[in-house]
Amino acid sequence: MSVTKLKHFINGKFVEAKSSEYFDLISPVTGKVVAQSPNATQEEVDAAYAAAKEAFKIWGRTTPSERQKALLKLADAIEANSDALVEAQSRNTGQIKALIASEEVAVSADQVRFFAGAARCLEGKSTGEYMHGLTSSIRREPLGVVGQVAPWNYPLMMAIWKCIPALAAGNTVVLKPSDTTPESTLLLAEIAAPFFPEGAINVLLGKAEVGSQIVSHKTAALVSITGSVRAGLAVAESAAKNLTRAHLELGGKAPVVVFADADLEKAAAHIAMTGFFNAGQDCTAATRVLVEESVHDKFLELLAKEAKATKFGSPDDSDALYGALNNANQLKHVQGFIDRLPPHAKIQAGGKAGNREGFYFEATVISHLKQDDEVIQKEIFGPVITVQSFKDEADAVFKANDVEFGLASSVWTKNHARATRLSRDLDFGTVWINTHIPLVGEMPHGGFKHSGYGKDLSSYGLEEYTRVKHVMASNED
């Protein structure tokens, strides 16, 4: 049976790859080849940037209301093509189809609609006379062409987070999806094409070196990546050479701080769901639990019970919480953490690959860990939750903050004053209270420390893709 060879999307259409260099896309569910992807050449990267630069001459001069109309049409088209987007993505990711539809396609359409409105609400200082005889005003302008690299854990939604705020602000885009999950992004570009100038959205396929070519290109006014700390550091270094602005959303190691007064059963159920959802392949996943000493053993028992009841399955299994890990290397990566556990660690649930074809891993809970253990300090990015105890509030804050990441966190307590204090003291870009993981388009998402800088979502995310210009005019004739 012949295997589909994918194409780049440049200047409003699919184009045949110039190179004969293709690599296989492997199904996480079966381990078999589902398609072949080209590796973009420098010539194709240049062509995509040239197309985006030409498109910017048109798109960059549109009014906010014109951009809003285009984005609203795109949101409707995303919903209309939900089934096709789900099929394309599940083929590459092994995610549960019902959850792609509800948690990515529907949410993505909503986020497009948010940015459609936000495009008309850019803010700046009031025009006025700040010096006698002179009037000052602020222009908030698009940057130009933006180079972007998206990850494989939520391919459609991450493509939306990248290109939609950039387009809403009047920029054009050269985007590279992950080499393992390009198909839903290609379909998104095809769906979007009728609503934007040719070249406004360009999608290049390839491995890491293509991403490097995109983020180092001199045409880029800003480069953005969602990925590992290692990749983010490389992008920041590359961008610095051209003094290009960078937007980095990197790894996470979210602390989940559970106090004795919390509703332990409710907390255990919610934490298990948000730690194992999408096979734990989420930078904000609830995977590092800190529990007050007096209730540690009780909570650990509840969490282990939840893990043992958590089901993984194939994309069509709507009863499963999560599907396969994205690729063989990721399965090996997760298994490596288990294999390297220190003798004092105890596996309370799971701890091994799923006993079936594909890249599956059991829902896992590990206890009796020390603060400097690898599984506490490093991002696992799999369905693995660690549990530690803490003595008091100060100890909880210390252990929560004592990692290189600063993306997300949560606090579980009925004490309002304590929740308020911890929302101040936790060094993370998001602090949830008695919940974990929900995001809304109106509020920002982004981290501190090695989790990167810059915000996705919200008006702050839109402003990332703008520049501020001061215009001062004399009032004299």
Image (cartoon, helix red, strand yellow):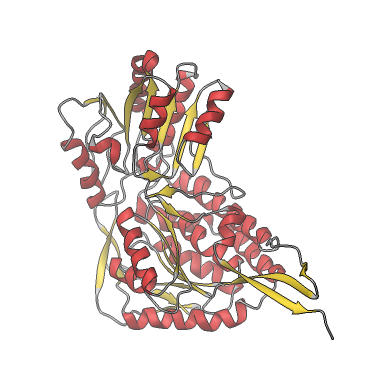
**Residue located 33% across and 59% down the image:** 233
Q: Is residue 299 above or below residue 165?
A: above
> Number of labelled discs?
0
**Residue located 31% across and 41% down the image:** 382
In the picture provided, is 456 more to the left or to the right than 442? left
In the picture provided, is 198 more to the left or to the right than 284? right
Image spot of residue 9 (x, y percent):
44, 74
Residue furthest front in the image: 132
Q: Is residue 426 above or below residue 182?
A: above
Can residue 320 be seen by looking at this rendering?
no
Image spot of residue 399 (x, y percent):
36, 31
The quadrant where residue 289 appears: top left
Image spot of residue 354 (x, y percent):
25, 37
**Residue located 36% across and 73% down the image:** 241
Image spot of residue 357 (x, y percent):
23, 44
Q: Nearer the viewer, residue 87 or 15?
A: 15
Q: Which quadrant is home to the N terminus?
A: bottom left
Q: Is residue 443 above or below residue 113?
A: above
